[in-house]
Each structure stands twice: as structure tokens, then as C-alpha cells.
Amino acid sequence: MAELDRTRTEVDVPGDWTYASAPESRDIVRIADSYGYYVGGEWLEPAETYETIAPRDEEPLAAIGQATAEDVGRAVVAAREAFADGWSALPGSERAKYLFRIARILQERSREFAVLESLNGGKPIKESRDVDIPLAAAHFFYYAGWADKLEYAFPNRRPRPVGVAGQIIPWNFPLLMLAWKIAPALACGNTVVLKPAETTPLTALLFCDVLRQAELPAGVVNIVTGDGRTGAAIVEHEDIDKIAFTGSTEVGKAIQRHVAGTGKRLTLELGGKAANIVFDDAALDQAVEGIVNGIYFNQGHVCCAGSRLFVQESIYEPLVAKLERRLTTLRVGDPLDKNTDVGAINSAAQLEKIQELVASGIEEGAEIYQPPCVLPEKGYWFVPTVFTNVAQSYRIAQEEIFGPVLSVLTFRTPEEAVEKANNTPYGLSAGVWTEKGSRILWMAQRLRAGVVWANTFNRFDPGSPFGGYKESGFGREGGRHGLEPYLRFDE
Ligand code: NDP
């Protein structure tokens, strides 16, 4: 025993287990000084440009075109011609070949895309490398598989393409949202005019090179860049048959008002304020990982983020203690470092919105917890935050923060959990943590959310439909359901 004790004291245990930095090289990425619009398979020169930056240090990356209504018009003409000139009449098996090619090229160039996504958007490289890019490729593979089987997906209904689709996407998953939009549209025989978000255009512009490599016929996919004005020009263009929009509820409502009565098809994927519900029989350590993944993944810039945590009262204290302890181990910093868990906030405007809502939480009386954390001096950063003592009426429990901020509330019974979880204008997603299978089913039937995860959170698969209720929008993306908005069935 004496021998053992002596041995133990002699072992040299490091007191500090911090990670060494492990930066991913950005040499693989070539960024041009400026970019135009990809229209009809060619690059058009923009008359006006703005600068896109890296949110981690505000480094200017490239000059990006601000497309006008005339530029959008040219893209629509190119898309219409490509639709009429053969793409819509191409056998599904031929369309599938292009989609398979795009998917394979994305896989081959995945490191390049991951680095560029993290640089321009601020998300940790391990997320763009392990989630965004593989899932984007998976969407193209998945919808390639449907392209020649549409008659089987919709038996006896004569599915045909809708025409030209105008697609507008946000900045939180730039390439993945592009894949969600373009893959089903092309599989169904439509052509596309797509606008990436103002702050994150670079992977959509690199994607044009993938289209060139895949030898996709000119005009089938057209990419125009710019701010909300370019998006509005797409919505207002008379020769577009379908609008697919992902973004804020506010802009979604404006688009719906505009499209009403025009005969244009519309799908809206909007905001969320998801409930993540933990019962007292749940595996707590596993639940803590799910809570962390639910709200701190992608800095909380996730429409389906589990931003409202409902904890059964009997386990409130141990769960919050475990959660706060886990927060101290999250590594916030350089998005290109492979050890980073929480990257940079996407833009100054988004950081301001997060700060304003967090200030309102403190003002209204919630208790804030933020782990000790040294933030980089330049760029846009926010410390992962937990609010306890939150009332349902507080803004932080009602409004979408779209940042790494969690509001913790409690409940006693399953009925109370359902009532509180549904007390929101949104209805995109929810999570349930319990060992009881019957309770999962009982809850899933009552939660008004498009997706309900059980003992996990933020899981995505191209075969699984995704979309909302209420102010979270309508229409589904992913799965067989995701084909329907891009098809018409009239004779
Ligand atoms: P916005 O609604 O402002 O932007 C979304 C896209 O629409 C961007 O490309 C934007 O351009 C464009 N846009 C802006 N104004 C108009 C307009 N008047 N007409 C047409 N297009 C327009 O949202 P954010 O980019 O700020 O994204 C954050 C919000 O989006 C959050 O509320 C989040 O919940 C929601 N979201 C929902 C998702 C879902 O799947 N349901 C997924 C991701 C985000 P620009 O970039 O220039 O502003």
C-alpha cells in the first residue's frame, strides 16, 4: 500500500489539458478577387458589387455582384430556354446522371468546400466537413435516385415539371440549403434561378464550377448574388413558376403576400423556437450532449435549434449543473481549427440581434450563465449562454434568437410539457428525452412540430421530410415529399 501511494504521487500528471491548435490549411481554396453571376453557363459582369468577408476576423474575401432586376431577368430567360430546349424533356435516367455526377464531384472536392464554407460563414470546420458538405452530396445522390422513378413515387398521376424555380436561401447552411433546393428541382425536370444569402455567397459560386465539371447543360442552374433586393426581384419576376424560400418568417410573410393570386407555387421554410423536453427517466449525460448539440451546433444559427429546454422539475438541479459543467468544456474560436466546437457569429447584424435579445432576458429577470471564455479580439463572437429562471412570456422564450443562447424552463407532467412546448407561434421541430417508448409516441402525437426527435436532436437525412407548421412555414423538403412542390399533375 505504501509502495502504491508513493508511486501515485510520483506520476507527473499534467495540470492543464488544453488542446493545441489544429488549424485546417486554407491553401486548398482559391478565391477570386471578384465574382459575377452564373447565367446560361457563363459569367456575367456585375455593374455593382459589395464585399463578402470572413466573420472570424472581418478579412475581406471577394467582391460580389449585386444583381439587379435586369440581371435576374437574364437569368430567368436562360432558365426558361434551358427548360424548353431539352432539360424538361430529357428522360429521368439522363437527368439522374448529371445529379450523380454533381454528387460525386462534391464528394471529391469536399475539403475545398468545407474550408470555404467555414471561412465565409464562420461555422467550425468539423461541422462543415462532417455535416454540411457530406449531407449536401447525399441530397444530390438521393434525388438522383428519384429522377427516373417519379411515376412510381406518384402512381397514376402523370408527374411533370413545373418550369422555372426561383430559389432564395439563407446564410446558416449555404451549400446544404442550395442542395436542398436544387437537387429535387432538377430531378423533377425544372430549371433554376438561385440566390444565396448576401453574407455567404462563396460556396454557391464555387458550386458553379462543379456544374461546369459535370457538364450540366447551360441555363439549367443560374446563380445570381445580391441582398434582399435581388431576392425580391426573383419573387416579383413574372416568368417564374415556383418560389422556394428559406429564411425569416417576416420575409416569408412578405413573399406570401406578393405571390398570392399570381398562380406561382410557393414553399416556405421559416423560423423556429423548438422545445427540447427532458423527462426524469432520461439518460442525463446523453441528454446533456443532445441539448448542447441542439442549441450550440452552428452557433445556434439553426432554424430547428432546441432553443427552449423543458426539464422535468425533479431533475432540474442535477441537469442544469451537468449542463453548465459541460459548457465549460466547449471550445469557442477559430472556425478553421479542427478542435473548435463553437465558431464565429455569421455577421455583425446577427451579433447585434443576439446581444439585444440577451440583454432583454437579463432585463426581464432571467438568470444568465456563461462559462469562462476568452474570445478572439477581431471578428464576431458570442459566448455560449444558458438562461435559467425563465418565464414563458419572456422574449428569450418567445422570439427566435438564432444564436448560442438556451432558455431553460420546467414542467411537472407530460400534459404540462406539451402545453408549454406548443405555446409558440412556430412549429418546426421538437425533441423528447425519455426511456419510455410509449411516452415518446404519446408526445410526438401531441407536439405541433414538423419533426420530433426522440433521444437525439438535429439529425438530418435526405430521405426524411423536413418543414414546419404555423409560422414556421409550409411545404416539405427532403424525402419523397420534397419532390411534390416541383411537380404538376394536371393533364
Ligand atoms: P432573411 O429572411 O432576411 O433572408 C433569407 C434570404 O432571403 C436571404 O437570401 C435574403 O437575402 C433574402 N431576402 C431578404 N429580403 C428579401 C425579400 N424582401 N424578398 C426576397 N428575398 C429576400 O433571413 P436571414 O438570412 O436573416 O436568416 C435567418 C432567419 O431565417 C431566421 O429567422 C431563421 O429562422 C430562418 N431560417 C429558416 C430555416 C428553415 O429551414 N426553416 C433555415 C435557415 C434560416 P440577404 O441575404 O441579402 O438578406
Image (tube, rainbow, N blue to C red):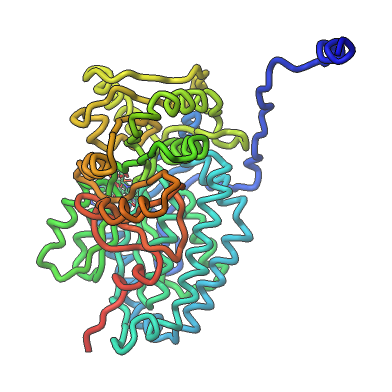
Q: Which quadrant would the C terminus be assigned to in this image? A: bottom left
**Along the viewing direction, whichever of 13 and 87 lies nearer the viewer:** 13
Left or right of 34 on screen, residue 234: left
**Along the viewing direction, whichever of 30 and 100 lies nearer the viewer:** 100
Left or right of 235 on screen, residue 84: right
Q: Position of residue 31 (x, y in %)?
A: 55, 46
**Along the viewing direction, whichever of 301 and 391 lies nearer the viewer:** 391
Q: Position of residue 152 (x, y in %)?
A: 40, 84
Can residue 335 be spotted in the picture?
yes
**Along the viewing direction, whichever of 45 and 200 lies nearer the viewer:** 200
Q: Position of residue 367 (x, y in %)?
A: 32, 18
Q: Is residue 64 above or below residue 149?
A: above
Q: Position of residue 442 (x, y in %)?
A: 31, 54
Can residue 61 be spotted in the picture?
no
Residue found at the very far front of the displayed protein: 1
Residue found at the very far right of the displayed protein: 3
What is the count of numbered marks? 0
The quarter of the displayed image where residue 49 is located: top left
Left or right of 145 on screen, residue 161: left
The residue positioned 89% from the left and 13% from the top of the image is 3
The residue positioned 49% from the left and 69% from the top of the image is 142
The residue positioned 16% from the left and 51% from the top of the image is 254
The residue positioned 45% from the left and 83% from the top of the image is 148
Q: Which quadrant would the N terminus be assigned to in this image? A: top right
Q: Is residue 192 above or below residue 307?
A: below
